[in-house]
Image (cartoon, coloured by chain):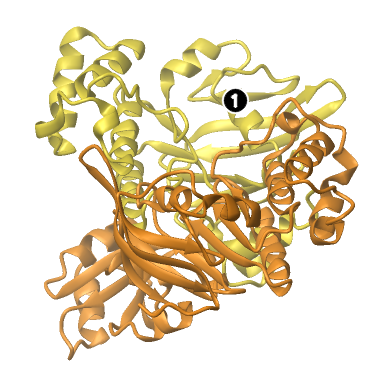
Amino acid sequence: MKLTLNMSITVQNISKSYNKIKAVETLSFAVNEGEIFGLIGPDGAGKTTLFRILTTLLFADEGTASVAGFDVVKEYKSIRNCVGYMPGKFSLYQDLSVEENLTFFATLFGTTIEENYDLIKDIYIQIEPFKTRRAGALSGGMKQKLALCCALIHKPKVLFLDEPTTGVDPVSRKEFWQMLKRLQQKGITILVSTPYMDEAALCDRIALIQKGKILKIDSPINIIEKYDKTIYDVRAKNTYQLLLDLKNHPSQYSVYAFGESIHYTDKETEFDSDTLKKYLEDKKHTEIEIQMTKPTIEDVFMDL
Amino acid sequence: MNQEKIITVNNLTKEFGSFTAVNSISFDVYKGEIFGFLGANGAGKTTAMKMLIGISKPTSGEATVAGFDVKTQAEMVKKSIGYMSQKFSMYDDLTIKENITFFGGIYGLSRAQIKEKTAQLIQELNLQDVADKLVKSLPQGWKQKLSFSVALLHEPKIVFLDEPTGGVDPITRRQFWEMIYAEAHKGTTLFVTTHYMDEAEYCDRVSIMVEGKIEALDSPKNLKQKYNVDSMNDVFLKLARNIE
């Protein structure tokens, strides 16, 4: 991989094992300055291990990595001054108030809330009415906003967000992503992980990651456009029976439930949806609808 | 769908001091139905669910679950239901067999029944090779599938699933939903909370709670038509936009 000066994060052949379990295996990628880069994958994919290595909290077994131009091992102190990290688990002080938490983190980095208020303003005004409330007594969405403020208060160049939206409802998730876009406009590079496939589309580029390995890196649009299988959206009155019958269709390649319908792909290039319709009619299905549909990141992920 | 009511809720209310967490909600759930119970963080879902599983007393209103009154027959309610959540599933430091035995005992099964159920469950889930291994050695997805099966050990009429699929990979998530479908097919009622809006679309009907009240209740298809949007995610955003 080419190392260029405007790379904000570089990861080269990073591996880390815990006893016999390989958490991440020879990972390599680079994140451009000002980019929102997503690590998309389920629990156990190695996302948190990677975050801990990049934030200098954990040594890799092999490989090298740099953040904002600094080596994660030799120059760890410089990295700690210029990155913000929001771990997956809420790790602010539950017994301190909203304001006390923020002041504490500002002081640690030798700054004040006033000095960098501009950066956090949009987010902080939403929790400011509760600034005397203990952090432990905040709702999920508010905790997450406070954690983001604390990670931003020293004006970091690079922001690491480990599953910031897990367990958060769709409304708060949407707001959170709007905040990230605004931070990006201020020149902050963001590495964010999520198990929600629909959030992938909001990143500039994503890495699909599973069991410690990167399966694909590209922009969400390219990942979808390069997918070469035709997906059919199949519906019928009895969805569960439909699922079972599609799985028994002789030339089926994959059958996955997708909301109200089922996504079906076939092994045959000459596949004709009328044949499938007839097969389902013979199985006594009613209200059958078969339509070609656009793949989603989730379709691609499941086929890797 | 079967029209036999398995859960009935009438003006159910829960107050904590001056705060009304659940504000006079009413709905019915039918036998064999997959019922999605949605709402934003803090909308009152968990409080409502706690009342339905008999661990929190309503301030006012009535609810029956499997024919039992949640106020006066809470112990009978607990015996007739299964419960599973992502946060509380199995004991990591017990083996798979020990967990099944433990939960079988909790649910009041006899030794003979536990033995039979254990063998059956291990075979169905293909866990023969790992039955004597600690649960913590299992991948997350397997744990969740096992934990769902354990919630079904005593053949409850209703199973409450509280965010059962958080953080699971998309294939496992679908395998999990196939288990849910299969169970509903046998006539079990599934009461599910989730933050994945695509999962809401797997439900026969969904309710959406906003600030303690049920603002919408219908099939995903009808809700999408009513709000003139393409996905449950958009329905949710339209209804819950004014939160916080």
Residue extending furthest toward the bottom: A270
Going by the image, does A266 lie left or right of A201?
Answer: left
| Residue at image coords 53%, 67% | A69
Left/right placement of residue B91 relative to residue B78 reads: left
Disc 1 marks which residue? B50
Across and down, in percent, residue B112 comes to: 15, 11
Whether A78 is drawn above or below A248: the answer is above
- Of all residues, the one furthest to the front in this rendering is A74
For badge 1, the amino acid type reads Lys
Residue A259 seen anywhere in this rendered image of the structure: no
Q: Position of residue B238 (x, y in %)?
A: 72, 62
Residue in the foreground of this view, choosing between A8 and B137 = A8
Q: Kindly indicate which chain is depicted in orange in the rendered structure.
A: A
Q: Residue at x 52, y 68 (%)?
A: A37
The image quadrant of residue B104 is top left
Foreground residue among B210 and A40 = A40
Q: Is residue A278 left or right of residue A67?
A: left
| Residue A99 in picture, x, y percent from top left | 84, 38
Picture layout, residue B147 above or below residue A63:
above
- List x then y, in percent, for residue B241: 76, 58
Q: Secondary structure at mark 1?
A: helix
- Does residue A40 show up? yes
Q: Nearer the viewer, residue A286 or A20?
A: A20
Q: Name above or below for residue B163 compared with residue B63.
A: below
Residue toward you, A301 or B184: A301
For residue A232, above or below residue B185: below
Chain coloured yellow in the rendered structure: B
